[in-house]
Image (cartoon, grey):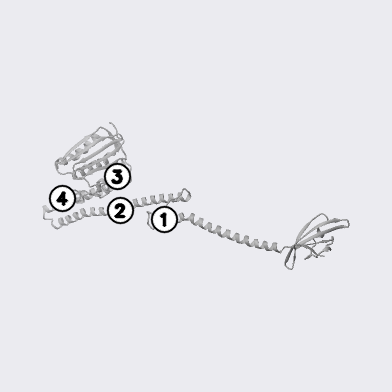
């Protein structure tokens, strides 16, 4: 007789699995035979696509051992398991998708500064050297951005210096070509005149004088250019010199010519010494005095001073001439640069003097400083290191 309670079925069976009381199992089972007298067990039975949970427990009676077996349908458990599998699968796929989207968002956020750096680098490669990137944070990308900006600053500065150097070299070549063309044209023209009219002594003498003058001018131009080239390569052998006697000798060279032109010349020197190369420093002093001579009118005043300072010795040449415009002060030491080109050429200038002076003073470890005011005059100071009392 079958017995059930709420879908639960049970029976009593002997040790051979033969039912004593209750229903037949929904499928073949050897669970009871495998347990023995002191073990309980359970299993899942399958029959016609349906699942059952089968349990067996031994009972010891006077007549022997019987087994109490019960079973019930377990299809809902497997259905719930499948549903849970599907739920877990969709949850897992959702988590993977959300994680992927989050990873993409974080990657895009992290790579945005790198994208700005890459764009800035491409713009710099295209010639936009003023490009900079925003620095945010102190992490690795922030430090990389600061390093990039520092590199860009340095690169822009160096390219600017190279551009300026190229401009000066272009101006140098153009000016040099122009400066050499003028005396060569004059020399060739006067030479042709001499050859065509040898029977006119006065004309021949005048032409020879012009050829000599232009030749000397060309010689001085080439010599100063050679000075610039040589001074770029050589170190100067310096020696200690008494500056008052040195400056007095410089004054004696130009004093007769200045007096002949009606220019009053004054010299004042402090006792002291400086380490110089006398021939090159003489060239500096004579150049500065000659520039002052060209700048002052008749009855003007030129003053040369030797001033002992705490750190060395200073040579100062001042005049009350026409002065130098403020916009020209920064360029007067460039090769071939002349404030008044027409006046400089008529007076035999080539625009190389102050460039050579600047290089000589630099090789001495000193400085060349200019102060000027239009209509009131100019003061040039050569400040040398290492001077002292005699």
How would you rate the neighbour count of disc 3 (Cα within 10 Å): few for under 14, some for 14-19, many for 20 or more? Answer: many
Which class describes the residues within 10 Å of circle 1: few (<14), some (14-19), or many (20+)?
many
- Towards the viewer: 287 or 323: 323
Q: Farthest bottom residue?
A: 48
Label 3 and label 1: CA atoms lie apart by: 40 Å
Evaluate whether residue 57 shows in this view.
yes
Q: Position of residue 336 (x, y in %)?
A: 25, 50
In the picture, the disc for residue 359 is 3
Left or right? Give the position of 194 relative to 50. Answer: left
Residue 373 sits above or below residue 128 on the image:
above
Question: Disc 3 versus disc 2: distance between alpha carbons?
Answer: 19 Å
Q: Residue at x 12, y 53 (%)?
A: 203
Question: Which residue in the protein does label 4 denote?
Answer: 209
Work out whether residue 333 or residue 276 is closer to the camera in this orientation and state it: 333
| Label 2 vs label 4, nearer the camera | 2
Quadrant including the N terminus: bottom right
Which labelled disc corresponds to residue 120? 1
Q: Are marks 3 and 1 in contact (CB under 8 Å)?
A: no
């Amino acid at each position: 007789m079958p017995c059930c309670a709420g879908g639960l079925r049970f029976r009593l069976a002997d040790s051979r699995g033969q039912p004593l009381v209750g229903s037949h199992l929904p499928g073949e089972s050897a669970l009871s035979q495998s347990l023995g007298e002191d073990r309980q067990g359970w299993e899942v039975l399958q029959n016609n696509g349906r699942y059952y949970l089968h349990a067996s427990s031994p009972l010891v009676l006077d007549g022997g051992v019987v087994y109490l077996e019960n079973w019930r349908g377990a299809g809902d458990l497997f259905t719930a398991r499948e549903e849970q599998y599907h739920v877990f699968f969709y949850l897992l796929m959702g988590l993977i998708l959300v994680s992927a989207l989050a990873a993409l968002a974080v990657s895009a956020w992290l790579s945005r500064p790198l994208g700005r750096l890459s764009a800035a680098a491409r713009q710099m490669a295209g010639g936009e050297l003023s490009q900079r990137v925003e620095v945010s944070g102190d992490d690795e990308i922030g430090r990389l951005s600061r390093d990039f900006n520092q590199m860009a600053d340095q690169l822009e500065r160096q390219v600017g210096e190279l551009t300026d150097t190229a401009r000066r070299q272009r101006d140098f070549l153009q000016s040099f070509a122009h400066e050499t063309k003028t005396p060569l044209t004059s020399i060739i023209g006067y030479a042709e005149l001499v050859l065509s009219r040898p029977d006119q002594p006065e004309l021949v003498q005048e032409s020879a004088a012009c050829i000599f003058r232009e030749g000397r001018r060309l010689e001085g131009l080439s010599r100063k250019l050679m000075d610039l080239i040589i001074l770029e390569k050589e170190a100067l052998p310096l020696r200690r010199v008494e500056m008052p006697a040195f400056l007095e000798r410089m004054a004696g060279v130009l004093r007769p010519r200045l007096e002949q032109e009606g220019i009053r010349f004054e010299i004042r020197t402090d006792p002291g010494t400086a380490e110089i190369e006398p021939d090159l420093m003489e060239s500096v002093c004579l150049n500065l005095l000659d520039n002052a001579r060209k700048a002052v009118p008749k009855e003007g005043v030129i003053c040369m001073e030797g001033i002992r300072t705490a750190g060395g010795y200073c040579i100062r040449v001042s005049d009350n001439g026409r002065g130098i415009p403020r916009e020209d002060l920064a360029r007067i030491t460039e090769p071939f640069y002349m404030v008044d080109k027409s006046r400089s050429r008529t007076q035999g200038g080539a625009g190389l003097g102050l460039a050579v002076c600047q290089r000589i003073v630099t090789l001495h470890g000193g400085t060349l400083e200019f102060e000027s005011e239009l209509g009131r005059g100019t003061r040039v100071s050569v400040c040398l290191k290492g001077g002292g009392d005699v």
